[in-house]
Amino acid sequence: MNRRENEIKYILESITEDLEGLYPNEQIARMILVIVTIFYLRELEQGEKDQAARAVLSESLSIAQMLDQTMIELEHQYKEFTGVFTGLVPSFLQYNYPDIILKTMIEKLISFQFIDQEEIVQFINLIALKYSCNYEENQTPETIIKLVLGLMDFENVSSVADYCSGISSFAIELFRHFRAERANKSVFYYGEEKNASDYLISKLLLNINNVPQFHIENKDVLERVHLEAERLEVDFVWSDAPFGVAWNQSEGQNDPRYKYGLPPKSSADWAFYQNALYHLNEHGQAAVVGTKGTLVRSTEVHIRKAITEEDLIEAVITLPDNLYLRARIGTELIIFNKTKSKNRSGKILFIDASKFTQRLNRNQCSITEEGISKIVYAYRNGTEEENFSRFVDLAKIREYNYSFNPKEYLDFDVLKYSFHQTVKLGDVATIRRGVQLTKEEIEELSGTTTHYLLNIKDIENGTIAYDEKSRITYKKRDWLEKFAIHPMDIIMTSKGSLIKFAIVEDKYEEAFVSGNLSIIRVNPAHYNVYVLYEFLQSEVGRRMLDGLQTGTTIKLINPSKLEKLEIPLLSIDLMNQVGAELRRSKQEYEERIQETEQRFTMERGRLLKQIGMNN
């Protein structure tokens, strides 16, 4: 940030500080936005710097009254601002703004000496950015907009639609991009935003930034579409909708947008994406933002299947975690294309750029410049790179039940070919998730106890810790087979970012596993449990398991996916020979650890006793 930008940022902070504590923060942002825009329009109108602002200070009316009057006059004079100022700040008088505060603000604006009108526009954009960062839950990060502008070829684009447009940051950056490229393009921009305040700020910014042709609607994107004749068709659709919001599924009945199926009530993600597809013309492209859950949830597989079979998905790009200020999760970019090139037909390009991350501030990250360049190059040129980008045939997508998780294809699917022969884990073992219990059920079953109840905390360093406070009895007899541990079972955490394992040895306590764990029961005639245990914890094994994880905020491994895990196939004799050695080494290691801990405890007690601290 250069010196001038710092000065502009400082004057904004100074004005904001004058009002903090007097009014709600969101109202402060709107108020400053309106006053500075009035300042800009009056200068534009008068043609003589500071004249209008100084006139306000010398009027006989109070400054609050004068600003109210000015808002109404400007809305009448500049039709494009109709309802904007009075909508954002209904009345300065209503809030009893002290004239001294308003006078101080205007004097600071006068004294700052903006270089030109362009710099005032820059100041207004900064105010809007501060507003969006503080009050917008799902404001699109600048780094994602920059990436999309690099990915898309706008040369033949004449119309753009933005659904859940917020304050139209995408549009402003798009037209700034056109001006930087010296592209004298005639592009129509359409936006829909249901938040009234964002809608008004959007209209203000689009006018101030001289976006030539646009139309914004204050409307809920998911509001039912009734008439096919009202359909807007454009060349490009951008949609950064709220993640995983619940919606009224019944509203989607008979809505022509949802030809590929209705999403579940718990998440409208694929309703937003189908809306984007619906509004594309026959040559159109769309870019939408989602989460890992978007790509893999079983409740939406029917939609992913239908869209995949029409070959409408061109690329799925995994981005770094924590790009959004208030959502510390990983994000995915999906690109739809109604006219894929012949060499990309029947394929989807998967890109994993999750590692190209850099800290933006204490609460947020961004994509590195190298990461953006690599993504853009791979997408535009169709290049493949190990562990980064790969084209996958639709036949493979079908095999993986229409999962769009890039790691499954870039890690899991590639790594398995590094083995001479493989076998699916489900062919040599049975896998079962533990019992799901509510707190009430646990309390009910803890009256008379027969078994320990194991949870994630009880699995550590390959061993099981039995907690006397976690004991229950079974609710049904079949629990003894379904959820009780047996010798040589592998216990694995099925929830959480860190996957942990333990083997149930011959000496064990009767226990059930909770729903946060899974039991892998190996058939000893087909595989050795100790060889499997070591493979799962190896670097290759963990990378493959990472490719199977689903979930947005909490990582999950579903037993049905685990059954498909390809593991190296070796002769059973060789595995038993190696497994016996592994078992002996593991037992020796654990015994020595136990002996060392006991020796340390005794020695520590002896030394503390010498100084009277053995209590």
Image (cartoon, rainbow, N blue to C red):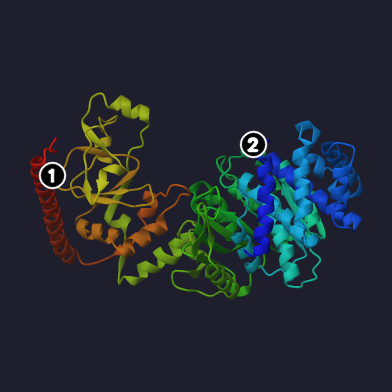
Dot 2 alpha-carbon crowd within 10 angstroms: few under 14, some 14 to 19, many 20 or more: few
Q: Dot 1: within a 10 Å radius of its alpha carbon, few (fewer than 14), some, or many (20 or more) residues? A: few
**Numbered disc 2: secondary structure:** loop
Find disc 2 in the rendering and name its residue: 21
Question: What's the residue type where badge 2 is placed?
Answer: Gly
What residue would you read off at disc 1?
507
What residue is drawn where x is 19% and y is 50%?
488
Is residue 84 visible in this depiction of the protein? Answer: yes
Give coordinates of residue 329: x percent, y percent: 50, 51
Which residue is located at x 22 percent, y 45 percent?
464
Q: Nearer the viewer, residue 566 or 554?
A: 554
Which residue: 29% across, 27% down?
445
Name above or below for residue 387 compared with residue 275. below
**Disc 1 residue type (three-letter):** Lys
* Position of the N terminus by quadrant: bottom right
Q: Judge by depth and name the residue closer to the eye, 393 or 27.
A: 27
Could you say which quadrant of the image residue 24 lies in? top right
Percent of width and height locating residue 483 = 28, 40
Q: How many marks?
A: 2
Q: Earlier in the sequence, mark 2 or mark 1?
A: 2
Residue 453 point in image, percent of width and height:
27, 36
Would residue 259 be visible to someone looking at this image? Answer: no
Gap in angstroms between the C-alphas marked 2 and 1: 65 Å
Please, is residue 99 above or below residue 299 in the view? above
- Check contact, mark 2 vs mark 1: CB within 8 A: no
Discs 2/1, front: 2
Is residue 321 left or right of 229 when viewed as pictured?
Answer: left
**Residue shown at 29% from the left, 58% from the top:** 536
On screen, residue 366 versus residue 282, left or right, reads: left
Quadrant (top left/top right/bottom left/bottom right) for the C terminus: top left
